[in-house]
Amino acid sequence: MPFRGAPMAEIRRVMHELWEDRELAALPAERQVEIALRLFVEPYSEDKLTGVLALAERLLGHLTLADVPRLARPFAEGDIDDWSTCDWYCVKVLGPFIERAPDPRAAAEAVAAWRSAESLWQRRAAAVAFVNLAPRADDVFPGLARLILDVCASNVRDPARFSQTGVGWVLRELSRADPEAVAGFVRDHRHEMSREALRAATARLRGD
């Protein structure tokens, strides 16, 4: 992944200047979302992050359940193929999109369905999108903890490191809300989990 060497503050400043100077905010929201997604096609990490920030800081309130297929497109087209871009996208866009949706359950289920995607990074996103929601689990909506565990059960079958670490990360956060469920998952799936995933998933169970 090539880098320009620009710090986050500079990327954010340029993104907002772009939206103001080009009067992009005057365009229909659908067109603005397409412009943000087009930035993921660019090869540089900072350009992709500009797209993430545009979606998160300019367009999040315009995203609807109907946009989920478009939000999946950077994965399907290979424009998100590294852990850094994937995780920024999850934390900045997908998680907040789920939480702010009129029907968080429907939004969560749509993103969780990515666990069966062809792309490793999209499958990782199906788990990592929930890392900031998992500590509250069923307080977000009843059944969220079960949905997260279902995603993890699917992803843990893949021995690839970034599938495993996605599982470990979201389970670690879920253990704040439901340590017994996480302990049960680890007990049932220990044979499928990498050592790295196990360490992460059980970190709070061990009191680390």
Image (spheres, rainbow, N blue to C red):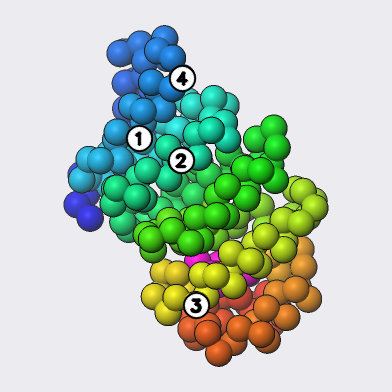
Q: CA distance from mark 4 to mark 3?
A: 38 Å
Please name the amino acid that badge 1 sits on. Leu
Q: Main secondary structure of the magenta part?
A: helix
**Picture residue at 55% right of the left edge, 60% below the top:** 127
Quarter containing the N terminus: bottom left
- Residue situated in front as seen by the camera: 6 or 58: 58
Q: Nearer the N terminus, badge 2 or badge 4?
A: 4
Q: Is residue 86 above or below residue 168?
A: above
- Residue situated in front as seen by the camera: 9 or 108: 108
- Labels 1 & 4 near each other (Cβ < 8 A): no
Residue beneath disc 4: 29
Residue 20 appears in view: no
**SS for dot 3:** loop
Image-based side of 191 in relation to 100, left or right: left
Residue beneath disc 3: 157
**Picture residue at 31% right of the left edge, 56% below the top:** 81
Between tags 4 and 3, which lies in front? 3
* Residue 46: x %, y % from top left: 29, 42
Residue beneath disc 1: 37
User: Per the image, is 3 magenta?
Assistant: no
Q: Nearer the N terminus, badge 3 or badge 1?
A: 1
**Picture residue at 29% right of the left edge, 48% below the top:** 77
Q: Nearer the N terminus, badge 2 or badge 1?
A: 1
Q: Is residue 18 above or below residue 67?
A: above
Q: Nearer the N terminus, badge 4 or badge 3?
A: 4
Please name the amino acid that badge 3 sits on. Arg
Question: What span is in magenta?
Answer: 166-173
Q: How many residues crowd mark 3 within 10 Å: few (<14), some (14–19), many (20+)? A: some
Residue beneath disc 2: 69
